Amino acid sequence: MEKLSFAEIDNTVNATLEPPGRMYWTVVALLFCGVLVGAACWGWQILVGIGAGGQNSPVNWGTYLINFVFWVGIAHSGTLISAILYLLRAGWRNPIARAAETMTVFAVCTAGLFPFIHLGRVWMVYYMLPVPNQRTLWPNFQSPLMFDVVAISTYFIVSVLFWYTGMLPDFAVIRDRAAGVRKKIFTVLSLGWTARYEQWRHYSRGYLLFAALATPLVISVHSVVSWDFALGVAPGWHTTIFAPYFVAGAIHSGLAMVLTLMIPMRRIFNAQRIITMHVLESVAKTIVFTGLIVGFAYGTEYFIAWYSRNSVEMEVFALRSTGDFALQYWIMVVCNSLVPLLFFIRRIRTSIIWLFAISILVNIGMWFERFVIIISSVARDFLPHAWGDYAPTGIEYGIMLGSFCLFFFLFFLFVKHLPSISMTEMKELQHQAGTHD
Amino acid sequence: MDRRTFLKLAGMGSLTFASACTLESEKKLYSLVKNQDDMVSGKANWYAATCRRCPAGCGVLAKNREGRVIKLEGNPLHPVNRGKLCIRGQSGLQAVYHPDRLKRPRIKQDGRWQALSFEEAIARLAEKTRSAAARGKNRVRMLTCLEGDVCMGLFEKSMAALNGTGPLVFEPFSHEHLRSANQAVFGVSGLPSYRLENADCLVSLGADFLETWLSPLEYARRFKAMHAYADGKKGLFFHVSPWRGLTGANADAWLSCRPGAEAVICLGLIRQVLARKGPSGISAQAARQIRAVSEPYTREKVIELSGIDQSGYDQMADALLLAKDPLILGAGALGRGRGDLQANIAANLLNFVLDPQLGKIDFTRRHRAEKAAGHGEIAAFFDQLTGNPPDVLLLNNVNPVYALPPEMETSGILANQQMFTVCFSNFMDETAQCADMVFPVSMALESWDEYGAYPDLLSFCQPAMKPLYGAPQIGDVFLRIAPDGAVENKDAKQELISRVQERWGISDTGAWLQAVRAGGRFDHKDASAGASGPAVMPAFQSWFEDPPALIRSESLLFAALPSVRFFDGRDAHIPWLCEIPDPVTKVAWQSPVLMHPETARKYGVRTGDVINLMNRSGSVSAPVYETQNIRPGLAGLQAGQGHAGPGRYSGGRGANPFSLFSLQRTADTETAFYAADTLRLEKSGSRQKLASTAGSMDPHGRKIALTVALSDLTRPPGPEKQGLAMHDFPLTLPMPEGYDAHRDFYPPHGHADYRWAMAVDLDRCIGCSACAAACYAENNLAVVGKQEVINGREMSWMHIEHYQQMDRPDQPIFLPMLCQHCDNAPCESVCPVFAPHHNKEGLNNQIYNRCIGTRFCAQNCPYKVRRFNWHDWNWPQPLNLQLNPDVTVRSKGVMEKCSFCVQRIKAAHGNAKDENRMIRDGEVSPACVQTCPTGALVFGSLMDPNSRVSKLVSDRRAYQVMGYLNTKPAVIYLKKVVHEI
């Protein structure tokens, strides 16, 4: 890889923190308006009831849980890149680890909102907290939703700590170059980092520990999310494949989101020398891998449905690909398992346009995967008399818009105010590269 | 100021501030300091009364809580309904509390309505009628719905005093063709009772005895007495009609025929019977006459003329010949021209040929509906109103503007300025809008009255509650407007007492009180009854001189279909009846045009396309509903909806089939027919989503609504294969003995004393949906409206699912579906806050206050019986007065579902504890079980080995819906028994 001096790295990253222009604030303001739209829609829904959305009987869960799973999925590859690849010493992760980890934190924040939005009586949500209370009621830990509460909050805490720990040396670099209020803020944020040997020793141990802690979470959290479905009895849900299938899908979507975020970012911040084509190509290769797993899972579902000889299972899957939700199903199959195969072609996986386009398609496909899973099974479950359809309403689209705006709003604030590329890890990379010369 | 004072002031100040600013309104419950004698807060009083929603006149018990009637149940002593009520009877209560109910009389002045007080209205009315009476004879005329003898007597006396003739009884479903047919064949112009229970083979030529025909609830019970599986036997029922409604859906075979061809088929059957059995027991002359009319109808000719399925026809003929006790019922009450009369005559002849003694037709127990005027008389009445308008026209609870063919221009006649039209109606229906004065009178539940459907039946109406708006009852109004001295008694109750004393010999107060408590006198045998039986054979041949009118054109024909929900249209404004879907189409709120898919294809329309149907008489606009339940070439529309006017539940909803009828007069002025001309179909170009609650009626081979052939049941049971797959999973009781270590993850539940369960006999279920209505009334279920039903958000805890039979997809089957109270409930384990809770008596309770609305339970319920409160539903005042105070009204964001009427179980617990005993079997009946007209639902405890439900559970036919999921449902179904025809 290209040789960069430590100063060049520092300069490039610090340049991203220059006071932003009017364009930036316009975009941020627009995104904030989007957040307000979502908030207003939610407020309306609280006022009139969940009926503001399109859910019904039998499709009691709609876009709120689709978006919940979607955003939790997005969160996962952040941790995959920052923690698992760290443990595996995959050097190409270093330039994008920070952004990916940030994506994780914000995606978990966004995802975490949806269970609240979804609740019929959100003002009673504290009933789910396992705290002694005068109601003498304890939550039901048999419920996969309680697993979720525990899993998501654990994941959020670990991700935030991991993210913050990783940024400490970088905060110190910024502190050293900053002046005025900014200096004061970063002085506090850097927690007195002086880059002494002791501190580096503790830091690297701590970072490794968090990476080790976060790694099983990547697997466990999305497995737990999958159990929201797999522990139910609905045909198409009640299957043991769900945990690995969901984890693979989560990483698939997260990697795509990393590409979606990194490609504009390296262009805007002129970070082509740091986030190199090699890095993007590596992500693309991983997407091929996860895409194949996901495609294999789609096939397995059909095989198991056929193998079970259970007519309910067989019909649910038959109706998935041919019934009322066939369009969504085929969007899912094409975008998630077929389109990524294009990355086998070197010219495509090294073309920025193709990378970006396919990453968007995979994101869309993964959203529809959740749609297909969550909607189509219960819409055609055991008693045909109860079968029904589902279409999201304006309120749901508003909340969905709000969630995307919230994510990008936070991410936009992040890239101009915090080091979006890890200087420390880039330097490590340079250092390692140097020694191998 | 020192520190202590400051603290005191600050403390007081902030306390005052905090206490003054509460958002909560005062929510206090006040109880009466001084109660009425018979009113105990929290305890219901039951008053026996009579349901007046249709001429059947079933006995009801009105449950009064704190002064308001909150629920109607059948009177178990009453011979018509024996403790049961139909969907309309259950829902009738909402008419009392209807938000559109008029509070005050109103008078039209210069085209605008002005409110009057009751006193003013009576004064005006008295002035008008008396001055009209003074002007000569017949200056006051009256049209009334069917009323009891006492009320009719009062009308007659008042009308006589007002120099007029007695009132004419107008009922849209007058059954006059049945009456005329009886006159023509048996010489009795009346409506007998049919002893369906004694028949072993029943043929209906369209008589919809489960929907609107004569006395639907009574006939439902009698029908199931012959048609429910018992002792290895089950009667046969053939339904011959161009369409299949609820009655047809309950037939063993629906034989579709051309409209108007029922008589042809029946004559063909007569010919076969005469040919094979000979005219035994019939006079030679009668035999000759019958032979003369039936001779032309050979088997081939019948099949050619009627379009009936050949093998079906042969099977029916064979079954009739083999049967020991065959019975033929004629056509329904909804007009299809002279074909109806011919069918009724032919049915009478066939009954006569098969059983000259007419053992199953009871002319001693004649139905009061026979007093209704025929179409000819009604037409003559309106002709007179046009030719010689009286000064005052009184209309009691009738809606001729809606129910008469448009060509009679009823609204124009009523709008005549010369005539002062008074409408005694509680609602601004079409007729009331044309009137000059609308006078709301108290309803049956608020009045003293009497209505017995049969001559030997005394059935009281008594005020089960104070009149909601203080309206007087119509008898009192007539006593006030009639000239003094016309009637000896000063109020309607006195009149009732003296008439009852006279006629029924109830002389002392004790006997009177006893009768009122019981709801009437049900053991009375009238000496005068039994006189007129079938006697002679007058000429019926004239009706067959021209062959039965068969329109064999290629154009679209119209069929008005009876509706179990709306009757003749008087119930279309009742929210529950709109909300509960029709059991056959499963469409709520709307009245779609039923069309065979072939017909729809021919006209290039499909389900949901809004079409205009037009003929000479009028036009209707409604969405198409494609169904196999109607013959190709027909467009069917259920009667009842399509009301003009401001009704918030009925106004502008659906379409009115009466508006396509025209009046066909005959040479004989007595007889007239309503019939619809051929239709022109026009596509409107718009589409409308149907408010259907059925996703799919195809059971997809799943273990849902099962049937068993009668012949299989007569064989001893063979060894059954048991496994874990859908169809071989064993019946697993929701009891500790249902635990199997290989299948179960969680340990078994123990139960304390009771394990509540329900047995549903699909063989007895006729799909009438009375259970659903009872559930709405008992459990404060919300009415969500058309749009939310389209959105899939109806709140029914109990509903009827309509499936095709698995072995015979052309035959329907009804499945009552409610919470299965599973022992291994999928809903319970997934709730994070324990809102679904399994109690120690096996009930799956839903704790509303705990629910936070994750809706996971509903997702995980394989039976999809959980209902979520998508919004705060509203009960427009005063409908809220009907709410059951023993059941929580649920707010938005909360899940709810069937509780097995836990409030009733709790009440039974209280009673049993008071008497220091266990709850007896049959002591607790959920609302649905209580009202089921055919006894298809049985409730009880499985812990009691002698309970009826325990016995039914061990029946050979018992199974659990989707039992292989190992949910161990406590609702056990018994397979429907089918004949292999």
Image (cartoon, grey):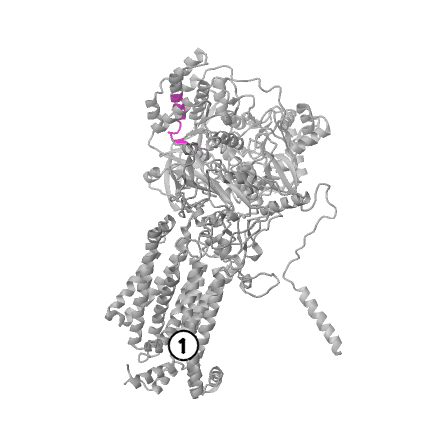
- Crowd band around label 1 with a 10 angstrom C-alpha radius: few (<14), some (14–19), many (20+): some
Pick the front one: B249 or B946? B946
Q: Amino acid at mark 1?
A: Val
Residue that label 1 marks? A415
Q: Is residue B480 visible?
A: no
How many marks the image carries: the answer is: 1
Q: Quadrant of the C terminus of chain B?
A: top left
Query: Residue B595, located in which quarter of the rendered image?
Result: top left
Could you tell whether B66 is left or right of A127 in the image? right
Decide whether residue B621 is among the magenta residues.
no
Pick the front one: B746 or B571? B746
Which SS class for mark 1? helix
In this view, B960 is above or below B18:
above
Pick the front one: B759 or B694? B759
In this view, B849 is above or below B419:
below
Residue B92 location (% of width, % of height): 57, 39
Could you tell whether B787 is left or right of B69 in the image? left
Decide whether residue B264 is among the magenta residues.
yes
Residue A302 location (% of width, % of height): 33, 55
In the image, the segment drawn in magenta is: B251-269
Q: Quadrant of the N terminus of chain B?
A: bottom right
Q: Is residue B180 visible?
A: yes
